[in-house]
Image: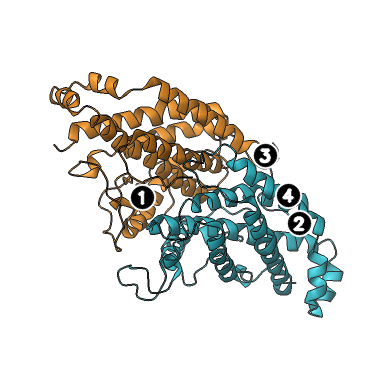
Chain colours: A orange, B cyan
């Protein structure tokens, strides 16, 4: 085991970091699907929470959780982007390693709205339908899962984009100046890497569940997580890479 | 996959519920050990948190997290016992299935102090020594792990004790009235079940890590989790069973 830098522009290190985040996403998804879909917790006005007439229970939980996290310094970290604006200020000094990211404001690359939308949309596919009344546990696990997905997407967006940029700044500057998003996306795409990730995800989900007792643990179909990676996590990461390059300070 | 009742006095159901909580504990421990021991976060007065001169960073995080959880209703649930007293009141109606627990106050069975102590004591064994500066992430994962361990211990304590009690109330009443804790503990102990749990934990930890990329994921020695189950989780569960019986309403 080497000491891998937290931040780097070396694509090998970055890929390893991204790979290390896969277990976290998979674990959290498996924990979430132990509960039913519980669609009421995503509906505005149905939270049953005192003084909260309009937000969904998930949105209330996200606000509480991120308010706490903001005080502890989570969002000082480039790849930790909040789902909420106007959070409390940080109450401790955060040790941040040097990072090779060139943005005025980290939140110019913030894909949390789309992450939340796509995540809520996948729940009826991966969870048992219906309502088991376990609303508090459902939104608790939703927050953990959303944060894990968000970290993976934003880490990839920022660091992969920067590492690709510095391989050929002249070429990227031309594409950025001409706002040629198709060509930029083409330059960012590596199909064979995406396919390798997909295969690895499938295998990890299968292994993670292989010793679970089916009398008590609910299993997830690996293909649904694979599909979520392929259709949501990877495309949103690339969308973030594009946003990064278009907003990169020179 | 059957529908298993959340609460029951059937030892088969209870054992399955307890088994289902094992993955959660294992996942969280694996996530925590991705960071160094970071012993400073457990030392009073070293939090660096504004306005917090005396508590450790973990204790501050636990207080923030449990204050949020209390508002969402976590501690209305019998097996969710808080590490803090004087938490805010619940702000939503919690759907709680009927539970066969006979206590005036759930917190007469609250082992959180011992859980926190033994957990902090195991960290230097399971984490890489030293300090990686990732204090916020360390205490975040500590809280998740502590809550998972606590849920397992308190669920086991309450429901296993009640299920054993009702197999022979007369015998238990005599032991309880004579305050014969040794005999009660003897009546609560099933060595062969404990050994089965231990074997299963070892296997689950091995499997959980079998596809991890060792270049980026730090692995945990299954024997350390096995030891933690054997020397801490199982004994504290039995201590909780004893407390339950001694405080059981008749």
Q: Mark 2 points at which residue?
A: B194
Label drawn at residue B199: 4
Residue count near mark 1 (Cα–Cα under 10 Å), binned few <14, some 14–19, many ≥20: few
Q: Mark 2 lies on which chain?
A: B
**Percent from the top left, x then y, of residue A98?**
27, 49
Above/below status of A215 relative to B199: above
Q: Which of marks 4 and 2 is nearer the N terminus?
A: 2
Q: Is residue A189 left or right of residue B128?
A: left
Mark 4 neighbour class, 10 Å CA radius: few under 14, some 14 to 19, many 20 or more: few
Q: Quadrant of residue B126?
A: bottom right
Residue A20 can be seen in this image: yes
Mark 2 to mark 3 CA distance (whole Å)? 18 Å
Kindly identify the residue that appears in the image at 16 percent across and 23 percent down: A179
Determine if marks 4 and 3 fall on one subunit.
no
> Quick check: B18 above or below A196?
below
Q: Work out how far the residue at label 4 is from the one at label 2, CA to CA, in angstroms.
A: 9 Å
Subunit that carries the residue with mark 1: A
Kindly identify which numbered label has been placed on residue A53: 1
């Amino acid at each position: 085991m080497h000491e891998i830098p937290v931040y780097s522009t070396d694509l090998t290190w970055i890929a390893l970091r991204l790979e290390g985040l896969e277990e976290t996403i998979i674990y959290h998804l498996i924990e979430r699907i132990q509960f039913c879909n519980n669609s009421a917790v995503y509906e505005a006005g149905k939270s049953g929470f005192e003084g909260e007439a309009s937000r969904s229970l998930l949105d209330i939980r996200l606000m509480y959780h991120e308010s706490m996290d903001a005080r502890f310094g989570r969002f000082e970290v480039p790849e930790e982007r909040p789902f909420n604006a106007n959070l409390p200020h940080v109450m401790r000094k955060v040790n941040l390693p040097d990072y090779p990211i060139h943005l005025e404001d980290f939140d110019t690359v913030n894909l949390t709205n789309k992450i939340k939308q796509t995540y809520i949309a996948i729940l009826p596919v991966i969870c048992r339908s219906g309502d088991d009344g376990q609303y508090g546990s459902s939104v608790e696990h939703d927050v953990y899962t959303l944060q894990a997905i968000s970290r993976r997407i934003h880490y990839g967006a920022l660091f992969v984009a920067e590492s690709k940029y510095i391989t050929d700044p002249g070429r990227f500057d031309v594409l950025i100046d001409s706002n040629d998003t198709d060509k930029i996306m083409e330059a960012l795409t590596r199909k064979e890497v995406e396919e390798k990730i997909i295969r690895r995800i499938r295998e990890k989900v299968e292994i993670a569940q292989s010793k679970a007792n089916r009398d008590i643990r609910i299993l997830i179909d690996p293909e649904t997580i694979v599909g979520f990676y392929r259709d949501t996590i990877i495309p949103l990461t690339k969308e973030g890479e594009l946003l990064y390059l278009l907003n990169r300070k020179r």
